[in-house]
């Protein structure tokens, strides 16, 4: 295949990808608010195209509300809800879905434009095409998640919510990573061996902690056991494992909250040690700045997490905590990219200089 674009870097492509990443950031935050306001089941049908229009008159609103009244959430949780109250939860979910459509267009149309004009670096073709496919998959998983709460349950399945969140975070990190690749800043000071693995390990730990947070949200576990550092006076509140340990890991509120707490302690320790070692060993500025930033945002995020828990997860604190998680992931991903590319480029330069 011929080279699509001679230059290795492209600032317009990077700006486009960063802009889409910002939209995905907003999408995750609004998704969290939709969950916290119990709005996620207000739209009971999946219409990727025609669903872009909300109800436009009282007749259409009445029909939409009638469909909502057929699902278990209305009968067991919101029985007696007025049409005006229904509109309140409907708009959260509609905005969430509409933003998903906007992200799809914001990615697909410029992608096609850059391809037609041959302004996309060839090395970014497969990553960008993969991101487009992941975005389509995310829409299908979103409906798969919602459908789990339309019959037999009063909310969505926690594991499906966590998968939906997990894929959103993967797309977000890949957008940032690909945008940084599009900038292609060139050679950097090489950090000592082992720091690339450490930085990737930290990204993985942040991601795992976010998934554990998804299980907490899916089980509404953030509204229970609101004392800290204990759980109702115990290290671990009673766990119902009568359906097996695996089921309890996904569905028992006490265990999922406990795991999220342990994940937070592990991440806090790892980020602090990472920063300490970076300064102790007099690492290059790239490593030290990244390490200090990660440690700082993790500590702030931990404090917000405790405040969120002890206040039984009000919407504004829950959303703030989710924003904090995205910021931690952003900084960790940026640091990992910087370190990995420093080693990779200097290794490649060394091979070329030796004529290999």
Image (cartoon, rainbow, N blue to C red):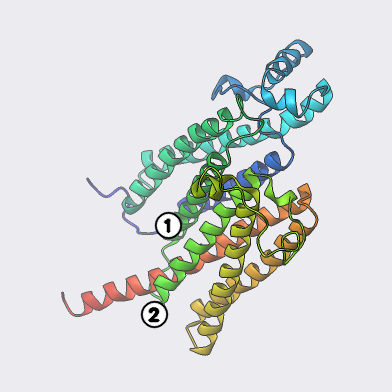
Image coords of residue 269 (percent x, y): 58, 74
Question: Residue, x 69% and y 68% (percent of image)?
Answer: 300
Screen quadrant of the N terminus: top left
Residue at the image position 73 percent from the left and 24 percent from the top: 74
Note whether residue 25 is visible.
Answer: no
**Relative to 81, 243 lies left or right:** left
Q: Is residue 318 left or right of residue 126?
A: right
Residue shown at 37% from the left, 49% from the top: 127
Outermost residue to the left? 356
Quarter of the figure with residue 303: bottom right
> Mark 2: which secondary structure?
loop
Instruction: Rate crowding at label 2 as few (under 14), some (14 to 19) or many (20 or more) other CA atoms within 10 Å.
Output: many
Q: Nearer the viewer, residue 133 or 166?
A: 166
1 or 2: tag closer to the N-terminus: 1
The quarter of the image holding the C terminus is: bottom left
Within-10-Å neighbours for mark 1: few <14, some 14–19, many 20+: many
Can you give x and y, in whole percent of width and height, for residue 334 in the image?
50, 65
Residue 345 to residue 106: above or below: below
Residue 302 is situated, as x and y percent measured from the top left of the image, at 68, 66
Per the rendering, the mark at residue 168 is none
Which residue is outermost to the front?
Answer: 242
Q: Which residue is mark 2?
A: 190
Name the residue that disc number 1 marks. Answer: 182
Decide which of 251, 302 is in the foreground and name it.
Answer: 251
Residue 337 or 275: which is nearer the viewer? 275
343 in relation to 279, above or below: above
* Front label number (1 vs 2): 2
How far separated are the C-alphas under marks 1 and 2? 20 Å
**Residue visible at 54% across and 25% down in the picture:** 48
Q: Are marks 1 and 2 in contact (CB under 8 Å)?
A: no
Taking 49 as reference, is 80 left or right?
right
Residue 321 visible, this angle: yes
């Amino acid at each position: 295949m011929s080279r699509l674009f001679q230059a290795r870097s492209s600032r317009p492509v990077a700006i486009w990808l960063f802009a889409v990443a910002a939209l995905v950031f907003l999408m995750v935050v609004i998704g969290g608010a939709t969950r916290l306001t119990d709005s996620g089941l207000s739209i009971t049908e999946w219409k990727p195209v025609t669903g872009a229009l909300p109800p436009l008159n009282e007749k259409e609103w009445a029909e939409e509300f009638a469909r909502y009244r057929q699902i278990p959430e209305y009968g067991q949780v919101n029985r007696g809800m007025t049409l005006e109250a229904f509109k309140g939860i409907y708009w959260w979910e509609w905005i969430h879905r509409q933003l998903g459509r906007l992200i799809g267009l914001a990615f697909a149309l410029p992608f096609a434009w850059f391809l037609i004009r041959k302004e996309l670096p060839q090395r970014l073709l497969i990553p960008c095409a993969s991101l487009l496919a992941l975005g389509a998959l995310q829409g299908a998983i979103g409906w798969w998640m919602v459908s789990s709460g339309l019959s037999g349950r009063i909310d969505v399945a926690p594991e499906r919510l966590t998968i939906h969140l997990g894929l959103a975070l993967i797309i977000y990190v890949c957008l940032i990573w690909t945008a940084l690749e599009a900038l292609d800043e060139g050679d950097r000071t090489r950090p000592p061996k082992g720091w690339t693995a450490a930085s990737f390990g930290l990204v993985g730990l942040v991601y795992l902690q976010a998934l554990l947070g998804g299980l907490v949200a899916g089980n509404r576990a953030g509204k229970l056991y609101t004392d800290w550092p204990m759980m109702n006076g115990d290290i671990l509140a009673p766990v119902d494992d009568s359906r097996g340990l695996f089921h309890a890991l996904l569905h028992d509120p006490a265990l999922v909250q406990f795991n999220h707490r342990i994940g937070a302690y592990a991440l806090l320790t790892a980020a602090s040690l990472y920063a300490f070692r970076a300064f102790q060993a007099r690492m290059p500025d790239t490593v030290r700045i990244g390490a200090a930033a990660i440690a700082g945002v993790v500590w702030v995020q931990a404090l917000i997490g405790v405040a969120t828990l002890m206040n039984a997860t009000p919407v504004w604190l829950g959303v703030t905590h989710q924003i904090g998680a995205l910021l931690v992931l952003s900084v960790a991903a940026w640091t990992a990219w910087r370190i990995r590319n420093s080693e990779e480029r200097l290794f490649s330069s060394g091979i070329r200089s030796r004529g290999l």
